Image (tube, rainbow, N blue to C red):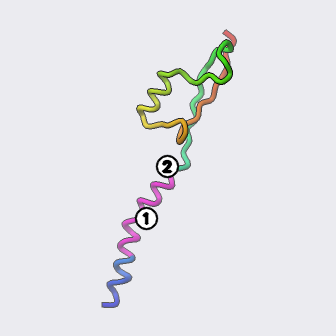
Amino acid sequence: MRRTGPAIVLALSALLTPLVSEAQQQAGKVRRVGYLANLAQPSDARPPLALRDGLKALGYSEDKNITYTRFLSWS
């Protein structure tokens, strides 16, 4: 009778540990995407809509797990 309490606690901790560790791993991943922009574009210009929509369809969100870096071109 006394062994059921610790056995239940041990079983629950074994079941819940993978859920907690998976949630922690996903929180820290921020991807960085660079894109080439023209100097004629304003400095606050966003990446092309097709790029943003494609990454959004794959599950990326600019506020959560992706950042954009703008590289300038002289042509």
Residue 50 located within the stretch drawn in magenta: no
Tell me the magenta residue range.
10-26
How packed mark 2 is, by other alpha carbons closer than 10 Å (few <14, some 14-19, many 20 or more), is: few
Q: Please tell me which of labels 1 and 2 falls first in the chain.
A: 1
Q: Secondary structure at mark 2?
A: helix
Give amino acid for label 2: Gln
Tell me where residue 66 appears, x and y as whole percent: 54, 37
Q: Alpha-carbon distance for marks 1 and 2?
A: 15 Å
Q: Using residue 65 as the reference point, say whether residue 8 is left or right of it.
A: left
Pick the front one: 65 or 11 = 65
Q: In the displayed structure, would residue 58 be above or below residue 38?
A: below
The picture places residue 40, in percent across and down from the top left corner, at 67, 12
Q: Where does residue 36 sit, x and y in percent of width and height? A: 61, 20
Amino acid, disc 1: Thr
- For the point 40% across and 65% down, the residue is 16
Q: Which mark is residue 26?
A: 2
> Which residue is situated farthest in the left direction here?
1
Which residue does the numbered mark 1 point to in the structure image?
17
Side (left or right) of 54 relative to 41: left
Residue 17 coordinates in the image, percent (x, y): 43, 64
Residue shown at 41% from the left, 60% from the top = 18
Q: Residue at x 37, y 71 (%)?
A: 12
Magenta stretch, main secondary structure class: helix
Q: Quadrant of the C terminus?
A: top right
- Residue 24 magenta: yes
Q: Quadrant of the N terminus?
A: bottom left
